[in-house]
Image (cartoon, rainbow, N blue to C red):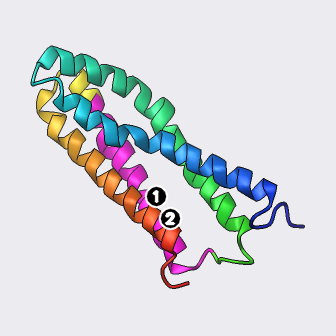
Amino acid sequence: MVLAQVGSTGYNILLFLHVVAIVVALSPTFVYPFLARDTNGEYSVRRTLYAGIAKRSMRIYGSSLIIGGLLGFGVAGLSDKVYQLSDGWLVASVIAWLAMNGVLHGMVIPTEKAIADGDEPNTKKAETGSLIISVLFLLSLYLMIFKPGV
């Protein structure tokens, strides 16, 4: 029994939710490094900024990244007549998503919490993590738009 086919309303709703969840998850990785730099090195302002960021990172952004990826599996599953989960571009997208989760949950979120708690030297580490996630996202976006090998 097929719940939805590629191009059907159900499929498009799932695809829409997948894209929205990923946009919610990744918007901060593009914005926060600029906000942090705009503090002009004022430690108390940066610490307050990262306290707010750290409070929302797991609850909103981390959860959205996980949900967005799981919705992506749903989209791929509904596309099985067109694409196979074993297609190289899909496998590479899954690996990039896993890597983004690893960097976010293992590097960025703990670093944001450390900065909020007063560990100012970690600012560069948070920016680096955001950059890595951004590059992995752009790689995923390329793979999903151009589907190399198909």
Residue 49 at what x, y percent from top left?
A: 27, 21
Do labels 1 and 2 touch, CB within 8 Å?
Answer: yes
**Residue under numbered circle 2:** 94
Magenta segment range? 85-112
Residue 125 on the magenta segment:
no
Q: Quadrant of the C terminus?
A: bottom right
Mark 1–mark 2 Cα distance, whole angstroms, equals 5 Å
In this rendered view, identify the residue nearer to me: 113 or 7: 7
Q: Is residue 79 visible?
A: yes
Query: Which of the pair 125/36 is nearer the observer?
Result: 36
**Dominant secondary structure of the residues highlighted in magenta in the image:** helix
In the rendered view, tell whether residue 16 sits above or below residue 50.
below
Neighbours of disc 2 within 10 Å: few (<14), some (14-19), many (20+): some
How busy is the neighbourhood of tag 1: few (under 14 within 10 Å), some, or many (20 plus)? many
Which image quadrant is residue 30 in?
Answer: top left
Q: Secondary structure at mark 1?
A: helix
Question: What type is the residue that disc 1 sits on?
Answer: Trp
Disc 1: which residue = 97
Left or right of residue 30, residue 90 in this image:
right
Residue at 19% from the left image edge and 42% from the top image edge:
125
Please state, as top left, top right, bottom left or bottom right, where the N terminus lies in the image.
Answer: bottom right
Q: Residue 113, image x and y in percent?
A: 29, 28
- Residue 107 vertical placement versus 144 (above, below): above
The answer to whether residue 95 is visible is no
- Check disc 2 and report its element: helix, strand or loop: helix
Residue 67 percent across, percent down from the top left? 58, 46
Q: What residue type is disc 2 on?
A: Val
Is residue 110 in the magenta section? yes
